[in-house]
Amino acid sequence: MKPVFNFPNIITAGRILLTPLFIWLMMSKDAMQVQLSAGVFLVAALSDWYDGWYARRHNAMSSFGRFFDPLADKVLVCAGFFAFVALDLVSLWMVLVIVGRDVAVTALRVVADRKHQPVVTSRLAKWKTAMQMGFLWYVVGILTLRQIEWASSYIGGRTLDMLFSPWIIQSSMLLLTILSLITAAQYLIENRHTLRILTNGSLARTTP
């Protein structure tokens, strides 16, 4: 797959570059930096919408962009989940399942593209990604509100604690983990023809 450095893909690359800055700010002990992390995340999330809109409006879509854009989303989401583990908000095993699924699917897409084989992405998988992003928004939002004195006073500490309870966070993560497993199985089933071609091709190369 040949990289195409048009304007939408440059925006997508910027989203990847913003990811380490977002993580560093969010994990900071400084209240202002935690608030800034929400701003960086907002810019990264809006760039996800804008690059797609621009590509469609100006006919700047490419096969590389269709691969690169969801990859940037996965980098942002997976990095955020690992940051939540470091902050002791979620369980590591759930994050490993989610990230492992995304890594395996991305690797398969790369191999399939090199063999010019189509890859089907289910609607449920798209919903799964949207829910992961929504969960990131939720956690980052609560973390930010806790650092804003007037907002924390207005909403109330007990309300914020309730919204950020381990039960809500862990239940949401469990749902996302289950969806990752379901969409992984669905992905393998819907792309079994492509997998069969790739497997047969690998066996043919290794057979003397």
Image: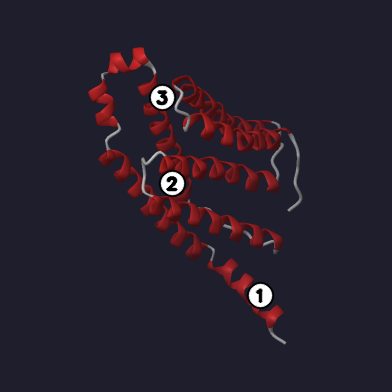
Between discs 1 and 3, the one toward the N terminus = 3
Q: Residue furthest bottom?
A: 208
- Does label 1 or label 2 sit earlier along the sequence? 2
Amino acid marked by disc 2: Lys
Under mark 1, the amino acid is Ser
Neighbour tally class for label 3: few under 14, some 14-19, many 20 plus, Cα within 10 Å = many
Type of amino acid at the residue the image marks with label 3: Thr
Residue 100 visible from this viewpoint: yes
> What kind of element bears circle 1?
helix
Residue picked out by circle 3? 144
Is the residue 62 above or below the residue 122 in the image?
above
| Left or right side of 166 for 9 | right
Dot 1 corresponds to which residue?
202
Q: Secondary structure at mark 2?
A: helix
Q: Where's the C terminus, which quadrant? A: bottom right
Give the image location of residue 24, x and y in percent: 53, 33
In the image, which is nearer the foreground, mark 1 or mark 3? 3
Q: Is residue 150 left or right of residue 114?
A: left
Task: Name the foreground residue: 186 vs 155.
Answer: 155
